[in-house]
């Protein structure tokens, strides 16, 4: 079986992708319910964003799994990189779910967010981009061997 040839970090990352995809399916049901109940036939903007983001992040997590499988880095580096990226994927989806449930805004950055939100966004950018750069570098190093 193929799974016997994959390391634990790759398998865990694939499982995370599956969990995100399952979550996206549930969010799709919520979106559908809102579309049916809405006079204009649309779900709240953040319910729609949560659904689409969860779908996108599930597939992005599969890309992370492929990068991990090909990376030259030790398992702990790959695991840390995936953990950081997936943490921020889930945190972003969670914030969209919160705004969709509260129906409190159509733009979470207006009015200008508090310093804590701006700091979180900087951490998200550094965490997501940094994680991918680390994993891509691991693949490049492995490729060059």
Image (cartoon, rainbow, N blue to C red):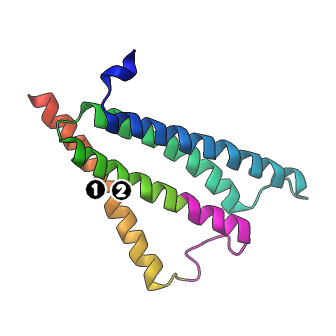
Q: Is residue 135 left or right of residue 84?
A: left
Kindly identify the residue that appears in the image at 23 percent across and 41 percent down.
75
| Front in this rendered view, residue 76 or 130 | 76
Give the label, 1 or 2, closer to the camera. 2
Where is residue 89 drawn, in percent x and y? 47, 55
Q: Residue furthest left?
A: 145
Where is residue 123 drawn, in percent x and y? 36, 68
Q: Which mark is residue 130?
A: 1
Q: Is residue 130 left or right of residue 33?
A: left
Element type where label 1 sits in the image: helix
Mark 2 burial class by Cα count in 10 Å: few <14, some 14-19, many 20+:
some
Q: Is residue 94 above or below residue 62?
A: below
Q: Which mark is residue 119?
A: none
Element type where label 2 sits in the image: helix
Where is residue 96 drawn, in percent x and y? 61, 63
Q: Which residue does the numbered mark 2 point to in the structure image?
A: 84
Q: Is residue 102 left or right of residue 91?
A: right
Q: Is residue 16 above or below residue 84?
A: above
Q: Quadrant of residue 2?
A: top left
Q: Is residue 128 above or below residue 67?
A: below
Q: Earlier in the sequence, mark 1 or mark 2?
A: 2
The quadrant of the rendering that contains the C terminus is top left
Where is residue 87 drawn, in percent x and y? 43, 57
Q: Which residues are magenta?
A: 93-111
Q: Are marks 1 and 2 in contact (CB under 8 Å)?
A: yes
């Amino acid at each position: 079986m193929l799974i016997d040839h994959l390391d634990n970090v790759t398998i865990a990352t694939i499982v995370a992708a599956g969990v995100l995809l399952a979550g996206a399916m549930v969010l799709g049901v919520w979106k559908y319910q809102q579309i049916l109940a809405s006079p204009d036939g649309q779900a709240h903007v953040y319910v729609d964003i949560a659904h689409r983001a969860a779908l996108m992040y599930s597939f992005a997590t599969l890309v992370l799994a492929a990068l991990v499988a090909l990376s030259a880095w030790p398992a702990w580096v790959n695991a840390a990189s995936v953990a950081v990226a997936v943490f921020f994927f889930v945190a972003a989806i969670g914030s969209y779910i919160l705004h969709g449930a509260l129906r409190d805004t159509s733009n979470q950055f207006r009015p200008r967010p508090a310093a804590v939100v701006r700091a979180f966004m900087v951490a998200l950018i550094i965490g997501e981009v940094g994680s991918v750069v680390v994993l891509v570098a691991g693949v490049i190093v492995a490729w060059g061997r």
